[in-house]
């Protein structure tokens, strides 16, 4: 998973000038590409389709912010702070909504409150930053309070219209949405934008492996997203050995390669070609234990690799003991 040594292809932004008026720092107390990642960017397509600022697919139609996500709900439970991206004043906040996330069962209860628990900061020059989907009970500010960049506002949660734990950061000037990765709006697919609001622009990662785990059966997807699917260890008589991979930002024709190796070498390896784009995806393969045979004791490694056009863009490993 990301926290277990993700190797990912990322695209840095060297030499881009910072736009005047507002400078942002990372709004979450985590390390991108290590303990958190960017799931979705602002939609730059004015029509019914969608595209992010790299003319790729990490967005959805009408998305007006940047989503800083955690791999699993277990990471959310541990607590990751949301921090002010710039000096400002608290214009308003909401707390008290549950972190149940968005589903058909919760839709009616969040209508009109899609941001969930959130904070709005105002900044000089007509700028605003809005922080959505914070964890219930975590809001650490009050209305009218002056805050400094880096000051804790709350924690990442899954309140409101959120299908995974993340912070949705919106940036506005004069009430109009602004993409912090291209605030001057000059971006085209042929000519990238030449400005940014970020003091240190986050590298662009076009997809990756969030979680890899080993288990004795194919886990439920809900357990994978919760971060509880992987076994800490297995017995020699486990009915099967299964490796699963949880990924984000995958595209049609991407390949997810899953592997298990043990004390006697390779146990299983298989490539799965994806048939469509996925914001998040889960794949698993396994091998059954035969008859009265047992698995050799020792260390087993599970690996998940995301390949795009034949190139590995993300790799993650995990290890367990069979004893």
Image: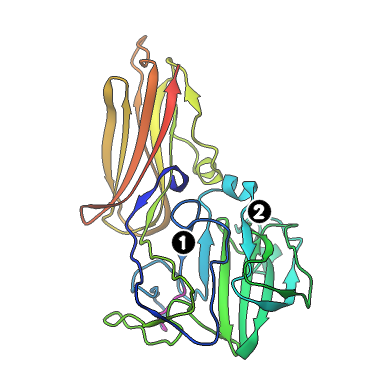
Identify the mark nearer the N-term, 1 or 2: 1
**Quarter residue 115 falls in:** bottom right
Colouring of the image: rainbow
Q: Nearer the viewer, mark 1 or mark 2?
A: 1
**Quarter residue 130 falls in:** bottom right
Q: Considering the numbered disc 1 on the image, is that residue within a helix, a strand or a loop?
A: strand
Q: Is residue 173 magenta?
A: no
Residue appearing at x 35%, y 60% in the figure: 277
Q: Position of residue 138 (x, y in %)?
A: 72, 58
For the residue carrying disc 2, how many other residues have a C-alpha within 10 Å: few (<14), some (14-19), or many (20+)?
some
Q: Disc 1, disc 2: CB below 8 Å?
A: no
Prevailing SS of the magenta stretch? loop
35 displayed left or right of 138? left
Tell which of 154 and 101 is nearer to you: 154
Q: Which residues are magenta?
A: 42-46
Q: Residue furthest left?
A: 310
Q: Quadrant of the N terminus?
A: top left
Structural distance between the alpha carbons of marks 1 and 2: 19 Å
Residue appearing at x 34%, y 38% in the figure: 303
User: In the image, which disc is placed on residue 269?
Assistant: none
For the residue carrying disc 1, how many other residues have a C-alpha within 10 Å: few (<14), some (14-19), or many (20+)?
many
Tell which of 279 and 318 is nearer to you: 318
178 displayed left or right of 264? right
Q: Position of residue 237 (x, y in %)?
A: 43, 15
Write down the residue under mark 2.
100
Q: Position of residue 315 (x, y in %)?
A: 34, 46
Q: Position of residue 25 (x, y in %)?
A: 54, 70
**Location of residue 288 with respect to 173 vertically, above or below:** above
**Location of residue 281 with respect to 61 vertically, above or below:** above
Query: Do we see residue 160 in this rendering?
Result: no
User: In the image, which disc is placed on residue 39?
Assistant: 1
């Amino acid at each position: 998973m990301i926290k277990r040594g993700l190797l990912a292809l990322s695209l840095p932004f060297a030499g881009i000038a910072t736009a005047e008026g507002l400078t942002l720092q990372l709004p979450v107390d985590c390390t991108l590409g290590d303990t958190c990642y960017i799931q979705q960017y602002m939609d730059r397509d004015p029509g019914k389709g969608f595209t992010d600022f790299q003319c790729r697919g990490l967005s959805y139609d009408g998305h007006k912010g940047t989503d800083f996500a955690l791999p699993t709900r277990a990471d959310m439970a541990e607590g990751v702070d949301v921090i002010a991206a710039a000096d400002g004043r608290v214009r308003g906040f909401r707390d008290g909504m549950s972190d149940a996330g968005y589903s058909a069962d919760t839709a009616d209860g969040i209508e009109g409150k899609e941001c969930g628990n959130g904070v709005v900061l105002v900044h000089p020059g007509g700028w605003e930053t809005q922080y959505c989907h914070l964890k219930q009970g975590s809001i650490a500010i009050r209305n009218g309070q002056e805050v400094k960049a880096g000051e804790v506002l709350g924690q990442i949660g899954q309140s409101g219209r959120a299908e995974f734990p993340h912070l949705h950061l919106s940036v506005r000037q004069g009430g109009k949405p602004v993409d912090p990765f291209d605030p001057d709006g000059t971006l085209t697919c042929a000519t990238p934008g030449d400005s940014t609001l970020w003091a240190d622009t986050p590298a662009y990662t076009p997809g990756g492996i969030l979680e890899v785990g080993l288990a004795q059966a194919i886990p439920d997807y809900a357990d994978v997203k919760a971060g509880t699917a992987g076994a800490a260890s297995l017995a020699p008589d486990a009915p099967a050995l299964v490796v699963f991979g949880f990924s984000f930002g995958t595209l049609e024709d991407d390949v997810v390669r899953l592997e298990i190796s043990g004390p006697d070498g390779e146990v299983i390896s298989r490539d799965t070609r994806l048939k469509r784009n996925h914001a998040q995806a889960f794949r698993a393969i396994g091998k059954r234990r035969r008859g009265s045979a047992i698995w050799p004791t020792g260390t087993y490694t599970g690996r998940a690799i995301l390949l795009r056009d034949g190139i590995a863009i993300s790799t993650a490993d995990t290890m367990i003991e069979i004893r």
